Image: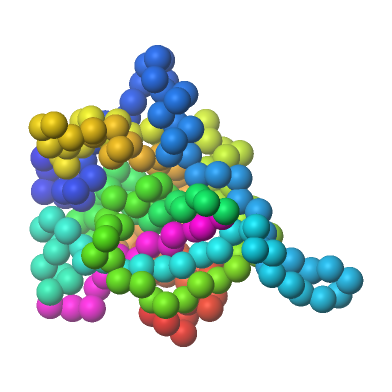
Amino acid sequence: MSWTQFIAAEAVPLSRLDHEYIQRKKLKQPPDLKAAFKRRKNKWYTDPKGAFATFYQSPLQGKLGILSKFSKQQHLTVVIEQGKTKTSIGFYPKGGNLAGSVFKHMDGELWSPDPLFNSESKSLGLKIPMNGEQCTRFNRIFRLNAHKCRLIDGTTSSLCLPGMDCKKLDRFECPDPRNYSLFGRGGYDNCITWLKYVFPRLKNYV
């Protein structure tokens, strides 16, 4: 494994020709999101059937974990809940090259589910009803442009252990127009600044 890679996420894409591709893709591809914050007759209201966003912080892993110990640098995940479905999403550099993004900006991607989100992730205590613009942004990336995405094969993951159903480690990786830089330098985004861009209310929390 290259030292430049995000150690907990190393895996390879599943071939689109694999007979299980379509079925496994359906399990990991985020759903078509519907706005929860709507306007009717010049009045705004919240639709409980729509999408709601909550946010969680997690320590960095691998060789970059030292940054979490000696600084406030944390990874930020958005968990989108719509009906009975919960979807975790994180913003990463292409291929998970977090260490490389310290020195230069990388192409940005959205990963779902977010491999850094786990039972020990800490909630920010913020729940936002998503508006139409926010839903459209995610739908465009994960649904409209799904042909540009990769389905990562969890059975090849560095987290896959003997006796484990490693298909649960599958994830959907999709390109995002914004570039990634670990420290958000030079106008580029990291996992925190990207979510602040999409959800401006986050600026009061992180």
Position of the N terminus by quadrant: top left
Q: Position of residue 147 (x, y in %)?
A: 52, 31
Asked whether 104 or 174 is in front, the reply is 174
Q: Is residue 105 above or below residue 12?
A: below
* 52 horizontally vs 77: left or right: right
* 168 horizontally vs 204: left or right: left
Picture residue at 18% right of the left edge, 35% below the top: 164
Q: Position of residue 20 (x, y in %)?
A: 39, 20
Q: Position of residue 36 (x, y in %)?
A: 66, 63
Q: Would you identify the image quadrant in which residue 9 lies?
A: top left
Picture residue at 56% right of the left edge, 63% below the top: 52
The outermost residue toward the right is 41
Position of the C terminus by quadrant: bottom left
Asked whether 53 or 180 is in front, the reply is 53
* 98 horizontally vs 123: left or right: left
Q: Judge whether residue 186 is colored magenta.
A: no
Q: Would you identify the image quadrant in which residue 165 lies?
A: top left
Q: Is residue 101 above or below residue 10?
A: below
Q: What span is in magenta?
A: 70-82
Asked whether 93 or 115 is in front, the reply is 115
Picture residue at 29% right of the left edge, 32% below the top: 167
Q: Judge whether residue 73 is colored magenta.
A: yes
Asked whether 32 or 173 is in front, the reply is 32
